[in-house]
Image (cartoon, rainbow, N blue to C red):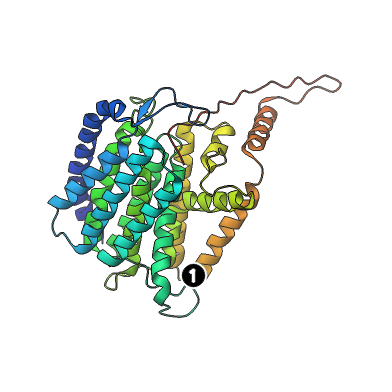
């Protein structure tokens, strides 16, 4: 096993390096064209990045992925289907970045992409394993709606997470890393190769989107590309859990990208209960709440990416320890319900609570009879990047 991991590591560096460089090159080439094409995110009351920022990250990632797949044999029908679905979503996403089209059209495009995976690529959810407590439970006629729902859901979950510099890309990298580890463990070498190529594309984008000492703020945003990354995660998850020759229990898949999915589910429920569109824009996402509570952009990215890794790690080891599969959906549903109730208070309430805690932590206890003067802590409310 140790030798296998070393071999995959060496091959992975080579396989991811070329897509990473290609994506970076495409970003450099596309970025100057963005203003003329109208693909620029301008600051407003919800997107408070410092300056207009090109929305070409999704285009660079997708084009690099398509070129890489074309040069990496074999071109199986599931890869061809993913390429066609990605191109469809790229066109619609680019139109949305340019003209801000109705969200129903984007959902229609995501549904069409899922249908391409299902009918053209044969990539679908047909089994949920032992999730209901008995063996070989197949979905039958429910396979199609379940595949569409899972694909559309993941696409929008990643899109909603794209509100802070580097967050969506980092969560995707975490998911890809865990999917690669599971694929290596299962012996699914074809999926490992495809995921490594995808990871290189996302890494090339993060060079321009992630905040680092040499890159103090994002110089390019994903735009509609965030939905394509959700499509890629869905495709990889289906191939990992639904392939007869290399099965990984389907109950693990939701735990590999848990934070954005849970946040998305809770927000949709809350918006529908309030009589609003499920895709209405607001500042109630988890990353907004953490920013309002005083965390830095880098802190939010590190915290949520770390939580994503931790959840996936615990779930994988729980399954290796033979924890019964029916417990996994129960735990996941409990996490969704728990976050729903914890997050009932608005972002402003979170910020006030955080300021109170920080004031008490910083202020010494006043002497008996003395008047305590509470300092005022100003919390910066910055949101970087476009989000749905």
Name the quarter where the N terminus is drawn: bottom left
Instruction: Name which residue lies at 65% across and 46% down.
Output: 344
Instruction: Name which residue lies at 51% across and 50% down.
Output: 264
Side of 63 relative to 231 (left or right): left
Query: Of residues 39 and 301, which is closer to you in this image?
Result: 39
Residue 298: x, y in percent?
45, 33
Instruction: Name which residue lies at 59% across and 26% down.
Output: 379
Residue 125, above or below 228: below
Element type at marker 1? loop
Side of 107 relative to 381 (left or right): left
Residue 336: x, y in percent?
57, 56
Side of 281 relative to 386 (left or right): right
Name the quadrant containing residue 253.
bottom left
Query: Of residues 213 and 103, which is closer to you in this image?
Result: 103
Whether residue 178 can be seen here: no
Residue 91: x, y in percent?
29, 45
Marker count (numbered): 1
* Disc 1 residue crowd, few under 14, some 14–19, many 20+, Cα 10 Å: few
Whether residue 285 can be seen here: yes
Name the quadrant containing residue 147.
bottom left
Farthest residue to the right: give it.
369
Residue 237, above or below 13: below
Residue 326, above or below 15: below
Residue 29: x, y in percent?
21, 30
Residue at numbered disc 1: 323
């Amino acid at each position: 096993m140790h030798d296998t991991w070393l071999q995959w590591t060496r091959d992975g560096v080579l396989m991811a390096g070329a897509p990473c460089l290609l994506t970076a090159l495409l970003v450099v080439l596309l970025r100057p064209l963005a203003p003329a094409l109208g693909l620029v995110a301008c600051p407003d009351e919800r997107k408070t990045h410092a300056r207009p920022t090109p929305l070409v990250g999704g285009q660079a990632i997708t084009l690099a992925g398509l070129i890489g797949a074309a040069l990496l044999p074999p071109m199986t029908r599931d890869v061809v289907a993913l390429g066609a679905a990605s191109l469809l979503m790229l066109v619609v996403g680019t139109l949305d970045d340019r003209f801000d089209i109705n969200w129903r059209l984007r959902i229609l495009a995501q549904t069409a992409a899922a249908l391409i995976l299902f009918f053209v690529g044969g990539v679908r959810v047909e089994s949920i394993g032992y999730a209901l407590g008995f063996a070989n439970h197949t979905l039958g006629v429910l396979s199609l709606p379940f595949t569409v729902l899972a694909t559309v859901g993941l696409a929008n979950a990643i899109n909603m997470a794209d509100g802070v510099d580097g967050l969506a890309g980092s969560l995707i990298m975490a998911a890809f890393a865990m999917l690669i580890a599971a694929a290596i463990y299962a012996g699914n070498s074809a999926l490992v190769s495809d995921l490594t190529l995808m990871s290189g594309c996302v890494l090339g984008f993060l060079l321009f989107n992630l905040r680092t000492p040499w890159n103090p703020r994002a110089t390019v945003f994903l735009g509609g590309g965030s939905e394509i990354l959700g499509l890629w995660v869905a495709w990889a998850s289906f191939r990992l859990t639904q392939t007869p020759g290399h099965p990984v229990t389907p109950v693990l898949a939701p735990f590999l990208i848990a934070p954005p999915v849970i946040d998305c589910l809770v927000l949709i429920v809350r918006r529908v209960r309030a009589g609003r569109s499920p895709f209405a824009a607001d500042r109630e996402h988890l990353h907004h709440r953490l920013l309002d509570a005083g965390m830095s952009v880098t802190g939010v990215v590190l915290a949520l990416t770390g939580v994503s890794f931790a959840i996936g790690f615990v779930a994988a080891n729980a399954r290796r320890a033979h924890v019964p599969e029916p417990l996994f959906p129960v735990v996941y549903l409990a996490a969704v319900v728990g976050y729903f109730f914890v997050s009932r208070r608005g972002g402003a309430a979170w910020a006030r609570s955080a300021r109170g805690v920080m004031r008490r932590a910083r202020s010494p206890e006043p002497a008996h009879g003395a008047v305590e003067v509470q300092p005022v802590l100003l919390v910066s409310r910055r949101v970087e990047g476009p989000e749905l």
